[in-house]
Image (cartoon, grey):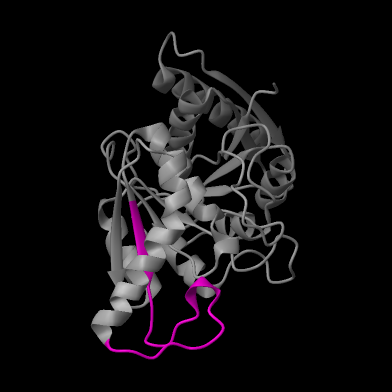
Amino acid sequence: MTQARVVVGIDGSAAAQQAMLWAVAECIRRDAALLLAHATGGSDRPRMSAAMGRCLQLALAEAKAYAGDGSGFRVSAVTTTEQPAELLIRLGEQADLLVVGSYGSGGQPALLGSVAHQVAAGARCPVLVVPGGWDERANHGQPVVVGVPASVAARGQLYAAFELAGARGVPVCAVRTWSQTDWSGGLAELIYTDGRSFEAHQQEYVELMLQPMRERYPAVSVRTLLSEDRTEEVLLRATARASLLVLGSRFVDGSPHGRLDSATTRLMQLAPCPVLVLGRTEERTAPLPKIGTSAGTR
């Protein structure tokens, strides 16, 4: 069986450093190999090359120190003169997971960087965006947050959230939002009803959607959160105490729209925890392969 591979972008920024530490911890959990990727954006001047080499050497040393002795952790590095987003998207073709910081060395912590946005939109494997102030060890034990989609065909994000929560030994917080007009569960007609009966319908729908995950991951506890507020607002509140937010994709991979819509982009920018953006190759109801296996989630 081919060993899984995680790729992380390195540029010397605080967000990239936290992304690397997150990736190290994930590789240890998954027995995956880590590849540190650094791009100079077209510059091959000697001074830039020397600085690039120092950046990679420091990153390699820090990654090994963070992993500790006896972990079996494997790490390597690559550097090119490509544009950073181009390099990471290319490496993502053969990776199980791409990890990037939310902003680069020239960016601002309050803004989502262009590289993170381009990679999350254009990669063909799952992309994990880590905020600069994140501390993976300090947030150990916090739940994985995921939205309950309105379509069974989009249930892959639930499988991913349960698989990740199971590997961490943490619960899942499953969020379901709605309006008084709803299409959930493939209903052929609109539903208009009073608040209490409508909420009961939504809870029933959530339980139906979660049943396969409960059966496959019986050790993972689940808390459901139902709300009539906007989805992104509820998810943001839930991530105040979370280890990870898992998002699906409205668009199929390869779509001219990319993977991201405005709500996903805003969550990537504002969520205080790492955000995992999954792709979609087609409409399907079967479970997605586990993140961290050689099959990936594509």
Pick the residue in front: 201 or 136. Answer: 201
The percent position of residue 293, horizontal first and vertical second, equals 61, 32
In the rendered structure, which segment of residues is drawn in magenta?
173-194
Tell me if 88 is positioned left or right of 131 in this view: right
Residue drawn at x 31%, y 57% is: 239
- The answer to which of 117 and 171 lies nearer the viewer is 171
In the rendered image, the residue lying farthest to the top is: 70
29 above or below 253? Answer: above
In the displayed structure, 88 sits above or below 279; it is above
Q: Is residue 14 visible?
A: no
Place residue 137 in its image quadrant. Answer: top left
Q: Looking at the magenta stretch, what is its main secondary structure?
A: loop
- Report x, y in % for residue 154: 57, 61
Q: Which residue is drawn at the image coordinates 63% and 54% (left, top)? A: 119
The x and y percentages for residue 30 are: 51, 27
93 relative to 264, above or below: above
- Does the segment drawn in magenta span residue 13? no
| Residue 177 belongs to magenta span | yes
| Residue 253 at least partly seen | yes
Q: Position of residue 26 (x, y in %)?
A: 47, 32
